[in-house]
Image (cartoon, rainbow, N blue to C red):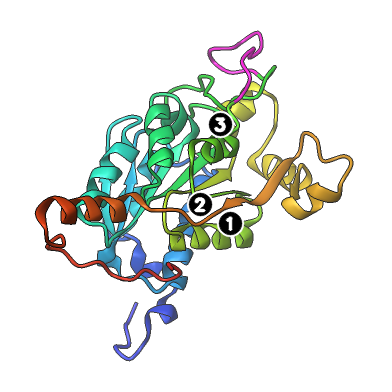
């Protein structure tokens, strides 16, 4: 593809954000929703006009954990459940960077659950995107912390008997500054939610409800990815509609659940450095779009 040097970044779309000469084709199953979430991240970065060198994408292990491999930013593919721990270290060292942490529901809330709670408690300036497909997809279809009650999996062949974690409720209770939920069917809304999360000063969580037709779908006789996508459309409702509806119980509620201004951890950390040393930290902070 020829390139006109006079073209602006937006003229290229999100093509320049992909490692298209190195890492494709991707490993995800045809019809998987994880690629849709990746597209939302790319479009959000583009809309915010962020410099690629100022963006870092961090992940752990699993299907979602492969996402940074395909994106041409600063990236880390870390150990299982530890993506937020690595991201916290990076944010402390480079507070001016925009750091997006992508995790699956198992990666974020099982082995990584403690990191998730304390990243929210600290209100550190990270954007955590949890792709919730209700299963451990890559490792064989075991039940995850968000597997619905009475559904089936490789580790629950006679029915799952544990209540699922409410990701968004947990994030709010733990202290996150921004919490929202979208689905991979409602892509335009998901784009906007991720964009708002990146703008937010503090710990921002977006639960991206997806599906795994290969493991969860087969085990629960949910047919094709198209059918599972259709279920997201038919079984979801906006925050505004849910507030007015009498039959909203059991549906996926989409939108922003929590948005508040509160002290951000690395800013407080800089204040400690200044109090201890008598001078400001020897690093410069950039003013992020949307920060007050």
Query: Dot 1 corresponds to which residue?
Result: 190
Say whether residue 248 is left or right of residue 106: right
Of labels 3 and 1, earlier in sequence is: 1
Quarter of the image for the C terminus: give it.
Answer: bottom left
Q: Is residue 79 left or right of residue 11?
A: left
Tag 3 secondary structure: helix
Pointer 1 or 2: first along the chain: 2
Q: Is residue 35 above or below residue 51?
A: above
**Residue 262: x, y in percent?**
46, 53
Q: Give the quadrant of residue 146.
A: top right
Query: What is the span of residues highlighted in magenta in the rendered image?
Result: 152-164
Res 214 label: 3
Disc 2 to disc 3, how far (Cα)? 18 Å
Count of numbered labels shown in the rendering: 3
Residue at 35% across, 61% down: 18
In this rendering, the answer to whether 291 lies above or below 110 is below
- Residue positioned 26% across, 57% down in the render: 95
Residue 177 is marked as none
Mark 1–mark 2 CB contact (< 8 Å) = yes
Left or right of 158? Residue 177 is: left
Residue annotated with mark 2:
37
Tag 1 secondary structure:
helix
Q: Is residue 140 left or right of residue 94?
A: right
As drawn, 8 above or below 140 = below
């Amino acid at each position: 593809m020829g390139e006109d040097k006079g073209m602006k970044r937006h003229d290229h779309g999100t093509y320049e954000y992909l490692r298209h000469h190195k890492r494709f084709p991707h490993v995800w199953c045809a019809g998987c929703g994880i690629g849709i979430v990746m597209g939302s991240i790319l479009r959000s970065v583009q809309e915010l006009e962020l410099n690629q060198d100022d963006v870092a994408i961090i992940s752990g292990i699993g299907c979602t954990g492969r996402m940074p491999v395909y994106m041409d930013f600063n990236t880390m593919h870390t150990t299982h459940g530890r993506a937020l721990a690595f991201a916290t270290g990076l944010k402390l060292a480079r507070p001016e960077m925009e750091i997006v942490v992508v995790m699956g529901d198992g990666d974020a809330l099982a082995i990584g659950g403690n990191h998730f709670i304390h990243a929210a408690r600290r209100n550190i300036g990270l954007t955590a995107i949890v792709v919730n497909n209700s299963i451990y997809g890559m490792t064989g279809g075991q039940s995850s912390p968000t597997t619905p009650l009475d559904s089936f999996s490789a580790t629950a062949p006679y029915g799952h008997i544990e209540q699922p974690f409410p990701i968004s409720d947990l994030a709010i209770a733990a202290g996150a500054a921004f919490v929202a939920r979208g689905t991979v069917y409602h892509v335009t809304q998901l784009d906007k939610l991720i964009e708002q999360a990146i703008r937010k000063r503090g710990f921002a969580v977006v639960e991206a409800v997806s599906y795994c037709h290969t493991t969860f779908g087969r085990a629960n006789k949910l047919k094709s990815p198209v059918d599972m996508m259709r279920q997201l459309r038919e079984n979801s409702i906006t925050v505004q509609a849910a507030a007015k509806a009498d039959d909203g119980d059991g549906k996926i509620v989409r939108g922003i659940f929590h948005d508040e201004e509160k002290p951000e951890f690395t800013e407080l950390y800089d204040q400690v450095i200044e109090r201890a040393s008598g001078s400001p930290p020897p690093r410069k902070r950039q003013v992020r779009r949307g920060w007050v």
